[in-house]
Image (cartoon, grey):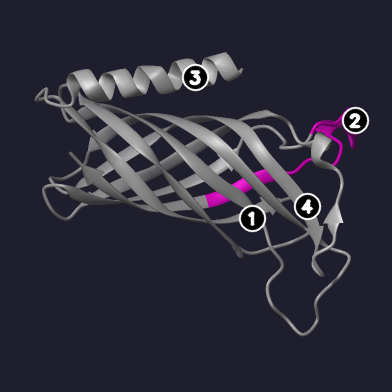
Amino acid sequence: MKKALLYSLSVIILCLSLNVSAQDFRAGLQFGITPSQVDGDGITGYNKIGLTGGVFLSRDLKDNIFLYTDLSFTMKGSKVASSKNVNYSQIEISANYIDWGVYAGYKFTDKIDLKAGLIPSVLIYNSEKTVSGMEVGVEDSFRPFNMLISGGLHYRFSKHFALNATYNYSIFSIRRGDYEIFNYDVKVRNAQYHHYINLSLMYQF
């Protein structure tokens, strides 16, 4: 898995170095925030605000179609909203990943690009704490690899700058676990799924 990640990073860096000057390629940097939650943990709301940053590469095809890929560090998880009626039994999640987004896109207007794709995601750190800050030692229960579906848009407001907004959801549970049959449906025990929005500023070289 680590070899695959290093290979992916090498490919993107190579493309950036060789093709950034080509007319049908666009490349650059992006940085932003990720309001997130985890479906299935009993906590609601995009209360966990993480950071994200990385590189992107886009290649134009014909008829307003383009291919887009990015490699980024992304912070995800869940957090209990500030309230006088806090449930101290709830567990907050922090999970950091290396995400490799692969998209197909369509130039809707001169300023707006639409895109949809998949994000292979590799876990590099995770922790769980109670609302009071006590760490819960269940790190090994997280899957080291996941896959997400993603869809969103770019809004270009100048030659070099654009805003990126995507909605992202885990295809697989973020936890390891046995499958069980519940009401004739096969489900993962203690299934939890990352559910977050990526809002970032893009700089095109």
- At x 49%, y 53%, the residue is 51
Q: Amino acid at mark 4?
A: Glu
* Residue wearing tag 1: 37
How far is mark 3 from mark 2, CA to CA? 35 Å
User: For the residue labelled by badge 4, is the local secondary structure a helix, a strand or a loop?
Assistant: strand
Disc with the residue nearer the chain's start (4 vs 3): 3
Question: Is 90 situated above or below 77?
Answer: below
Query: Are there few (<14), some (14-19), or many (20+) residues within 10 Å of tag 1?
Result: many
Disc with the residue nearer the chain's start (3 vs 2): 3
Question: Residue 77 at what x, y percent from top left?
Answer: 65, 52
* Residue wearing tag 4: 128
How far is mark 4 from mark 1, CA to CA? 13 Å
* Residue wearing tag 3: 6
Magenta span contains residue 71? no
Q: Which residues are magenta?
A: 176-196
Q: Quadrant of the C terminus?
A: top left
Disc with the residue nearer the chain's start (4 vs 2): 4
Q: Amino acid at mark 2?
A: Glu
Disc with the residue nearer the chain's start (3 vs 1): 3
Whether tag 3 and tag 1 are in contact, CB under 8 A, the answer is no
Disc with the residue nearer the chain's start (4 vs 1): 1
Question: Is 92 situated above or below 146?
Answer: below
Question: Residue 80 at what x, y percent from top left?
Answer: 72, 67
Whether tag 4 and tag 2 are in contact, CB under 8 A, the answer is no
Q: Amino acid at mark 3?
A: Leu
Question: Residue 137 at what x, y percent from top left?
Answer: 87, 46
User: For the residue labelled by badge 3, is the local secondary structure a helix, a strand or a loop?
Assistant: helix
Along the viewing direction, whichever of 201 and 178 lies nearer the viewer: 201
- At x 39%, y 18%, the residue is 10
* Residue wearing tag 2: 180
Q: Amino acid at mark 1?
A: Gln
